[in-house]
Amino acid sequence: MNKKISFGLCLSLVIIAVAATFAITMVFSKQVYNSIISNISQRSQTYDSAEEINRLISNYFYGDLEEYNNNLGAALAKGYVSVLNDSSSYYMTASEYASYTEKLESGQIGIGIDTIYDYSSGHLVVSYVYEGSSAESEGLEAGDIITAVNNVTVTRYNYQTLAGNFTGTRLSLVTVEYQRDDVTKTVTVMNTFNIPTVVYEEVSGIGYVRISGFYKNTENELKTALEALKRAGTESVVFDVRNTSEGTVEYAAKTIDVVVPNISGNIAVAKDKNGETVETFSAEYSEFPFRYAVLINSGTKGPAELFACDLRDIKQAQLIGTATAGVGTMQEIFNLDDGSAISLTVALVIPKNGETAVYDKTGVAPTMEVTVPVDDSGIALIPQEEDGQLSAAINLLKTN
């Protein structure tokens, strides 16, 4: 049975609804207002403190303020980003950003060596010499101990800065003093070599491929390596991404696409802090039907972790070594008006197997744990024949 509602009752309900809506709106507006006022207050206090520090330095610091004034803007920008306490978010000066972009898009120019500092002996050691490099032509070999660079003696406090001279501006010269068998020699080497991110060889009938970074050129370098191994009749490949952390998720996805077949679904999805998908990575092509193992350790970070995780989940690759660093995020570069830039973490990377395979903060666990008798950062100091992780991977691929 239908009942009619009187006009007065209807009007009363409308008024109540409007009043309730107004009340809710006022409460929400008050919350927003209080939040804004709180932020303004906090920012004001921050700016006041910064200005007070600047005034005290300007008035009382006993010393030259020219460098302070020149670098204040960069220091403030670094400070802003460093408070995030995220190693993947950082500030780059204009020159640092230019170098970063060139390296990412065009690769690294250098004399053609990798080095590692051996804290136990206090030596900067050549761990690898690239074939065809200027360093090779000048006679440098793996195992050489570098004692001075550009006439500056190497110490544990300056070795990173000095090693930075081994890469950089094309055609720049580097003077290297080194020891071998207690004999000291000095050579002058030119930065002319395009350092690859992928090197490969055959070890005991198994392909060994080391990937040192995931840049724009890594995809094609990996194709070249796998094609050569395929022509040689290789059926199994060990990828080594131990201590690999450089590059981007985007270029890692392109590299994964070289290895895995066309699959339904995605290689990975990146989601922002609101859970919205900001980028999707898919697999489209592969012609390399190898069996794979991947060497990982605590220095395997970021894009290298996605590479290992997806090969495990898509190609059933065995992961051998120790757990990875646990950086499962994606970064974006934002350019600033003065030519500098900041890298900010903007999304969580969700690999092939979805939320259950997310490795951020936890790392990717090996399917076969194998430790080495040195700190993970010193893995390059171990001779190949004594590398227990590599041996385990080769034996596994030979028996399966």
Image: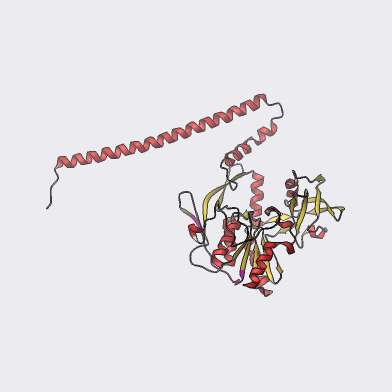
Residue 387, placed above or below residue 163: below
- In which image quadrant can residue 76 be found? top right
> Colour scheme in the image?
secondary structure
Q: Give how far across and how far down residue 229 sits, in percent.
A: 67, 71
Of residues 289 and 66, the one nearer the viewer is 289
Near-viewer residue (336 or 228): 228
Dominant secondary structure (helix, strand or loop) of the stretch shown in magenta: loop
Give the x, y percent position of residue 201.
Answer: 71, 67
* Apparent side of residue 256 relative to residue 234 in the rendered image (left or right): left
The answer to whether residue 347 is above or below residue 60 is below
Question: Could you say which quadrant of the image residue 135 lies in?
Answer: bottom right
Apparent side of residue 239 relative to residue 42 in the rendered image (left or right): right
Does any portion of residue 224 appear in the rendered image?
no
Nearest the camera: 53 or 338?
Answer: 53
**Was residue 283 drawn as part of the magenta stretch in this picture?**
yes
Q: At x 22% / y 41%, what residue is drawn?
A: 14
Residue 249 in sight in this render:
yes
User: Residue at coordinates 29% horizontally, 40% vertically from top-left?
Assistant: 21
Q: Quadrant of the C terminus?
A: bottom right
- Is 147 a magenta residue? no
Of all residues, the one furthest to the top in this rendering is 59
- Tell me what residue is drawn at x 44 percent, y 32 percent: 37
Q: Magenta segment, which residues?
A: 278-291
Q: Position of residue 166 (x, y in %)?
A: 75, 52
x then y, percent, for residue 397: 64, 70
